[in-house]
Amino acid sequence: MTTSAITTEQLQEIFPFPLDGFQLQAVAALNAGKSVVVCAPTGSGKTLIGEYAIHRALRQGRRVFYTTPLKALSNQKYRDFRAEFGEENVGLLTGDISINRDALVVVMTTEIFRNMLYGTRIGEVGTSMMGVEAVVLDECHYMNDKQRGTVWEESIIYCPPHIQLVALSATVANSKQLTDWINAVHGSTELIYSDFRPVPLEFHFVNPKGILPLLDPNTAKLNPKLKTHRPTGSRKTEDVPSIGFVVSKLAEREMLPAIYFIFSRRGCDKAVAEVSTLPLISKTEAAQLKIRIDEFLEKNPEAARAGQVEPLYKGIAAHHAGILPAWKVLVEELFTQGLIKVVFATETLAAGINMPARTTVISSLSKRTDQGHRLLTASEFLQMSGRAGRRGKDVVGYVVATQTRFEGAKEASDFATSAPDPLVSQFTPTYGMVLNLLQTHTLEEARELVERSFGHFTKTLHLLPQQQG
């Protein structure tokens, strides 16, 4: 792989603060020409490694593609990178938006990147990939997504081997397997693993009695004060704390600002209305909010969302896919500045969007999906939890699980003490994929491609000793 290392002095110019050990390890691996899998907790600073790849490429006039799983995250990265690297150097591709697509740094959804690669033979460089030194696969643990996970596998398989991959992932149980697979199908790859959280987390549980520690500090097991023998599903409505009660308790204990995760857009909007009268901000904050919101509405009157404007003046907001992008950007900026005290959000906010909070509240430990109602996975719980704790602002981050009719403290403690889920291949050859492949490959080559999937790799691991012998 063609690489161009940055000197220690240049690195200090780029990042005028001490880098953590895993970040320095990743920089060294990239300078050695390797791809990297960076597996570290949410909020630990993985993005700096992607930014290093950009700085390094720009100094040589080369290109970087930065891919994310969500349009909202791509939009945020585009705004951040324009401010950091200059408007002329950054482009955006999200399917419905194309801005400066020939820029040195192009932010895009992972589907767009995969589709770019469809048009050329595997291992070859199409015109869209000319001059690309590295591809950052942000939120690479999305490989576990049943509907879309195959996109990450295809992107890794199709990507020309001389291009460095920078795979940024939250902690998963089988990061070594993932690294070994990329090493086999793409090229020399190093695992950069860290379990260090700059801001440690404390887990709590809220029921109508208030907020209590979820775990016993001596045993790391369920707090005895929370034990209940009432069977699942038998809890009465009065046993479930209201959203207003939860937010009030957070305010009393100085645990705001908070991201309150609710798994439906309608639920988020209803929650905004429910707490809209709570006094959460100071007079100074109210004055600052009025200036910012009035300026925004004057420039963007069409972006105002019914039922959301007045609560926003009081430091209360919703954030989900049903809200116009301009309004979401305003919410993100105000929250980051500490002017919004609670944001009711769907779980997409957990996927890398930069809105750290002192506290995250998880309203339910189960959710409705296309496959029916199910419990969260350990990784989903950990991903949302990881948004708690602001680096440089908080000594500790708080994660608060809430009592529901169906789940209680026992289920919450199981999640809080569970290990991350392993990545499982979602690679499924579709008619569209096969037709795309057959435009540039023979049937035999297409069959070989399927055998390069992560799923095939993990299923044949037991054969490695025989193959090597």
Image (cartoon, grey):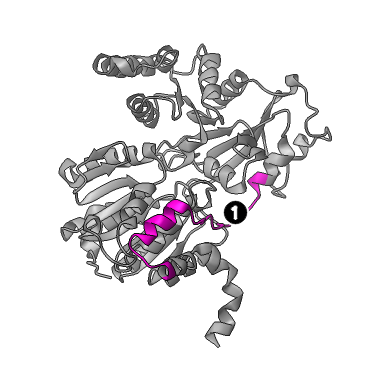
* Residue 235 drawn above or below residue 305: below
Q: Residue at x 25, y 40 (%)?
A: 98
Q: Judge whether residue 389 can be spotted in this image.
A: yes
Mostly what secondary structure, the magenta segment?
loop
* Residue 223 drawn above or below residue 60: above
Spot occupied by residue 325 in the image (x, y as percentages of width and height)? 35, 28
**304 is within the stretch colored magenta:** no
Looking at the rendered structure, the secondary structure element under dot 1 is loop
Spot occupied by residue 363 in the image (x, y as percentages of width and height)? 61, 30
Pointer 1 local density, CA inside 10 Å: few below 14, some 14–19, many at least 20: some
- Residue 256 versus residue 141: which sits nearer the camera? 141
Q: Residue at x 19, y 43 (%)?
A: 100
What residue sits right under mark 1 in the picture?
A: 421
Q: Judge whether residue 18 can be spotted in this image.
A: no
Spot occupied by residue 249 in the image (x, y as percentages of width and height)? 60, 23
Q: Is residue 397 left or right of residue 49?
A: right
- The segment highlighted magenta reads 415-444
Q: Quadrant of the C terminus?
A: bottom right
Q: Residue at x 24, y 68 (%)?
A: 3
- Residue 333 versus residue 302: which sits nearer the camera? 302
Q: Quadrant of the N terminus?
A: bottom left
- Residue 380 versus residue 204: which sits nearer the camera? 380
Q: Is residue 234 left or right of residue 141?
A: right
Look at label 1 and name its amino acid.
Asp
Q: Residue at x 46, y 42 (%)?
A: 351
Spot occupied by residue 397 in the image (x, y as percentages of width and height)? 52, 39
Give the total of numbered labels: 1
- Residue 416 versus residue 197: which sits nearer the camera? 416
